[in-house]
């Protein structure tokens, strides 16, 4: 006699059926900077978010996010924790998204820094190039990879001063590049995690990293028009 279907999760796999695929696993470097905001952007997209503080945390990650913070401090902490070489190896091979200080870490050139950056994105960046904390701002960013503009939150943000060959500009503010991509590596001058608009995270996971993310439903959230959703991050590093 047939038993009623108890639902996919508990059904024994019939011969020839593949086991259910695990959720994509995305690491967020958590030495300094905003782990929680990135987690809040990523988790609703169906990924398992892993806090990366030690080399072993990189095992079995599908992609990594390098958040904002203070690039000088982050570089020192990468050395101190023994994470620099493993992270370097990871971002050379696997998808990486760097936001603000994270972009500085991924860049080929940025001086002066206490240690060389990871040099996987062929751009030169200048730290704090929009001014001091008080000059932080939010502005609409034009992007070629979404279905409309994105609200960029710029906090003591770097500016991209040179674009290497093969670098694709994916976002501009007043004509200037503020988002770049080279293959599976993406760097943003602004903080997409500080709005409730997760379209850039979704694009990174789906289009850049090739991970399974649920399709977007409906138009961009209203909070896309203001950074109010999860705070403006005005007091962020
Ligand atoms: N000004 C910081 C730096 O140079 C970056 C700021 C940020 O990540 N919000 O590293």
Image: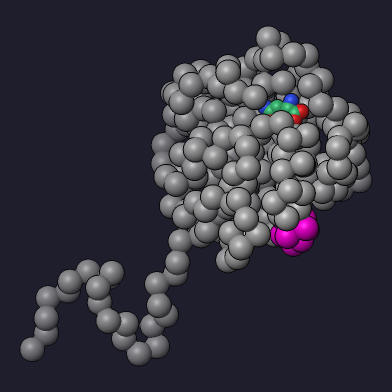
Taking the image as drawn, is residue 121 in sight? no
Q: Quadrant of ligand 1?
A: top right
Report the residue at 51% width, 35% height from top: 37
Q: Quadrant of residue 200?
A: top right
Tell whether position 34 is magenta: no
Q: Which span of residues is magenta-colored? A: 85-93
Q: Is 105 on the left or on the right of 68, as rendered?
A: right
Viewer-closest of 117 and 124: 117
Report the residue at 52% width, 53% height from top: 50
Q: Quadrant of residue 97?
A: top right
Majority secondary structure of the magenta segment?
helix
| Percent coordinates x, y for residue 83 in the rendering | 71, 54
Report the residue at 78% width, 34% height from top: 72
| Percent coordinates x, y for residue 87 in the rendering | 72, 55
Task: Point out the image quarter for the C terminus.
Answer: top right
| Percent coordinates x, y for residue 44 in the rendering | 42, 45
Viewer-closest of 140 and 228: 228
Task: Point out the image quarter for the N terminus.
Answer: bottom left
């Amino acid at each position: 006699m047939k038993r009623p279907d108890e639902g996919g999760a508990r059904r024994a796999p019939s011969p020839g059926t593949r086991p259910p695929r695990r959720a994509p696993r995305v690491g967020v470097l958590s030495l300094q900077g905003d782990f929680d905001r990135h987690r809040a952007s990523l988790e609703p997209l169906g990924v398992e978010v892993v806090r990366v503080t030690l080399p072993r945390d990189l095992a079995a990650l599908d992609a990594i996010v390098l958040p904002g913070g203070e690039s000088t401090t982050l570089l020192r902490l990468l050395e101190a924790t023994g994470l620099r070489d493993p992270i370097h190896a990871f971002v050379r091979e696997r998808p990486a998204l760097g936001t603000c200080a994270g972009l500085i870490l991924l860049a080929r050139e940025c001086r002066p820094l206490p240690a060389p950056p990871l040099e996987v994105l062929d751009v030169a960046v200048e730290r704090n190039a929009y001014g001091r904390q008080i000059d932080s701002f939010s502005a609409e960013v034009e992007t070629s990879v979404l279905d409309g503009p994105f609200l960029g939150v710029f906090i003591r943000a770097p500016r991209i001063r040179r674009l290497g060959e093969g670098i694709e500009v994916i976002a501009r503010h007043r004509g200037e590049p503020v988002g770049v991509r080279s293959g599976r590596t993406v760097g943003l001058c602004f903080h997409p995690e500080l709005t409730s608009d997760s379209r850039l995270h979704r694009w990174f996971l789906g289009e850049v990293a090739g991970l399974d993310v649920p399709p977007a439903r409906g138009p961009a959230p209203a909070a896309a028009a203001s950074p109010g959703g999860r705070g403006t991050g005005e007091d962020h590093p």
